[in-house]
């Protein structure tokens, strides 16, 4: 008997899928430092705060648009082909950025890159850390390769990942089963090394979820059962139900769709990507005047985020979603209010004083709290509250909301910082506090619950106008 057994293939498949997020993380870590490098400003000139924001955020709108089609692409082609296509488009965009000879070409590269991001990528903090330190290393090059090299590396990694996904990732058994390819699904289960017991557990849960959703669909849209349908129309009616574009807004799931869209949007309005994209600028504003110092501090913040995310992922199920998001939001808002108050009170001085160090430490504390709570909890919650029939579409819509608010944060952060040293901090603190209050009222706990139990939790929570009116009456009484 050997001491070390070879891991089953599904472990390698999972690792390969998750490695795709490295690309997005790297781009997030690269773009902020690159746009303030000496070589970049010599090539394209010094940009206004608005143009600077557009350069950084131009990747996000196409990502938001393409993310709406990610679920459809995954349903039609399967996840491996979707990942491969997205990574290839992303790599082409990064190559255009690396080869840019004028600002328009650079922006086109970011737009193309964004299309690829929206199709499949999710942020992974190891990529963010690599991106920051790549820029820290190349900033010393005395040529345009100081800012081109990070994008060249990113393009090469993207193309390599695209090929690997196409060659080595297999379709999921669930996707094959949905498309009626049961024999192939059984072969993939065997290939991935999933035990019969685990396979049976997954299939039973899937069958139960499908049966429940079919029953709910008939009740909501008032269609007869299969036995009551004329034989010639059963396929047509079943297809109509399956392809119903507005199903995510049907009565039984629209509250969950709305909550997922709200949470994924407000996740960005906490200011996380304002910090990640413009970390060198924030550290410089706080008193780290040297570009090397601000780049290094940005890299350290990425290390902190990466390290903290590991226990956050491990302990996510122990902490629960509701408390994690509510208390995490309160912590984030307190830290943001402190930084804003210090700047508003003119207590932050570039050369000396404790104020600047409080701000610098607070940026790290913000990153820690966010990574432990909102970074993991919100994305898990937005997906797990959806029933199977709407999960792909509703999650894509929620991610689209995330991209759009990400765009607003990336665009407006440098503008706000140029107009006011404290406005951005107060804005993010207010948005985070409002989100915590909304979650305290409308958000049921889902930790360890089945789809049936989640359904009942949302019904008992009475999400909707009744709850809103009740809260409004309480607020009115308390103010009178």
Image (cartoon, helix red, strand yellow):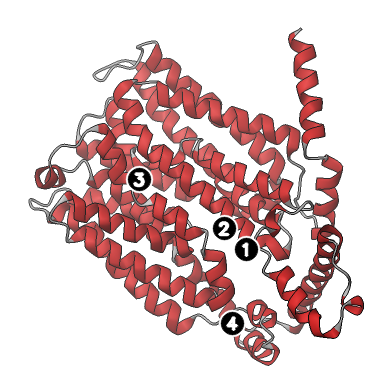
Q: CA distance from mark 4 to mark 1?
A: 35 Å
Q: Position of residue 13 (x, y in %)?
A: 53, 76
Q: CA distance from mark 3 to mark 2?
A: 20 Å
Residue 264 numbered mark, or none: none
- For this view, does 115 lie left or right of residue 170? left
Q: Secondary structure at mark 1?
A: helix
Ranked by sequence position, the earlier of labels 4 and 1 is 4
Quadrant of the image for the N terminus? bottom right
Q: Secondary structure at mark 4?
A: loop
Residue identifier under label 4 = 5
Q: Position of residue 53 (x, y in %)?
A: 31, 39
Q: Quadrant of residue 171?
A: bottom right
Quick check: 349 above or below 127? above
The residue lying at 81 percent from left, 85 percent from top is 232
Quick check: 403 above or below 475? below
- Residue 328 visible in the shown view: yes
Ranked by sequence position, the earlier of labels 3 and 4 is 4
Ranked by sequence position, the earlier of labels 3 and 1 is 3
Q: CA distance from mark 3 to mark 1?
A: 25 Å
Judged from this view, the residue extending furthest toward the top is: 480
> Of discs 4 and 1, which sits in the foreground?
1
The residue lying at 25 percent from left, 38 percent from top is 51
Q: CA distance from mark 4 to mark 2?
A: 38 Å
- Residue 7 visible in the shown view: no
Q: Quadrant of residue 451?
A: bottom right
Residue neighbourhood size for the residue with mark 2, other residues' Cα within 10 Å, grouped as few (<14), some (14–19), many (≥20) = many
Residue identifier under label 2 = 396
Quick check: 195 above or below 331? below
- Whether tag 4 and tag 2 are in contact, CB under 8 A, the answer is no
- Whether tag 2 and tag 1 are in contact, CB under 8 A, the answer is yes
Residue identifier under label 1 = 392
Q: Position of residue 224 (x, y in %)?
A: 88, 70
């Amino acid at each position: 008997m050997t001491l070390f057994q070879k891991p089953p293939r599904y472990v390698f498949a999972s690792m390969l899928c998750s490695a795709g997020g490295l690309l997005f993380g790297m781009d997030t870590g690269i773009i902020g430092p690159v746009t303030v490098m000496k070589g970049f400003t010599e090539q394209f000139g010094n940009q206004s705060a608005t143009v600077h924001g557009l350069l950084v955020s131009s990747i996000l709108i196409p990502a938001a648009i393409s993310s709406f089609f990610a679920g459809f692409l995954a349903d039609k082609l399967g996840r491996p082909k979707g990942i491969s296509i997205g990574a290839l488009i992303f790599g082409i965009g990064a190559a255009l950025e690396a080869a840019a000879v004028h600002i328009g070409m650079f922006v086109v590269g970011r737009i193309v890159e964004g299309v690829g991001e929206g199709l499949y990528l999710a942020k992974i903090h190891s990529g963010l850390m690599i991106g920051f330190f790549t820029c820290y290393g190349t900033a010393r090059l005395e040529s345009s390769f100081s800012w081109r090299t990070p994008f060249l590396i990113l393009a090469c990694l993207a193309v390599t990942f695209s090929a690997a996904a196409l060659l080595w990732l297999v379709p999921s058994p669930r996707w094959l089963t949905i498309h009626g390819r049961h024999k192939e699904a059984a072969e993939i289960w065997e290939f991935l090394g999933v035990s019969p017991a685990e396979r049976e557990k997954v299939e039973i849960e899937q069958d139960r979820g499908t049966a429940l959703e079919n029953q709910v669909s008939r009740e909501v849209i008032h269609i007869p059962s299969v036995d009551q349908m004329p034989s010639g129309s059963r396929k047509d009616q079943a297809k109509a139900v399956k392809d119903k574009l507005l199903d995510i807004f049907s009565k039984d799931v629209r509250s969950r769709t709305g909550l997922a869209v709200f949470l994924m949007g407000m996740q960005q309005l906490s200011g996380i990507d304002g910090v990640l994209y413009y970390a060198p600028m924030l550290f410089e504003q706080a008193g780290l005047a040297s570009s090397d110092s601000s780049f290094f501090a940005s890299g350290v913040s990425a290390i902190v985020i990466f390290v903290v995310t590991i226990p956050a992922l491990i302990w996510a199920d122990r902490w629960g979603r509701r408390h994690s998001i509510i208390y995490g939001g309160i912590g984030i808002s307190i830290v943001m209010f402190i930084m804003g108050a210090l700047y508003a009170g003119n207590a932050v001085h570039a050369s000396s004083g404790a104020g600047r160090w409080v701000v610098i430490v607070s940026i790290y504390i913000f990153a820690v709290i966010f990574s432990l709570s909102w970074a993991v909890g919100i994305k898990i919650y937005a997906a797990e509250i959806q029933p199977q029939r709407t999960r792909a579409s509703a999650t894509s819509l929620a991610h689209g909301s995330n991209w759009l608010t990400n765009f607003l944060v990336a665009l407006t952060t440098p503008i706000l910082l140029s107009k006011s040293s404290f406005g951005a901090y107060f804005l993010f603190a207010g948005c985070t506090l409002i989100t915590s209050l909304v979650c305290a009222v409308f958000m049921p706990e889902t930790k360890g619950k089945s789809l049936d139990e989640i359904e009942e939790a949302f019904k008992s929570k009475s999400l909707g106008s009744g709850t809103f009116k009740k809260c409004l009456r309480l607020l009115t009484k308390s103010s009178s």
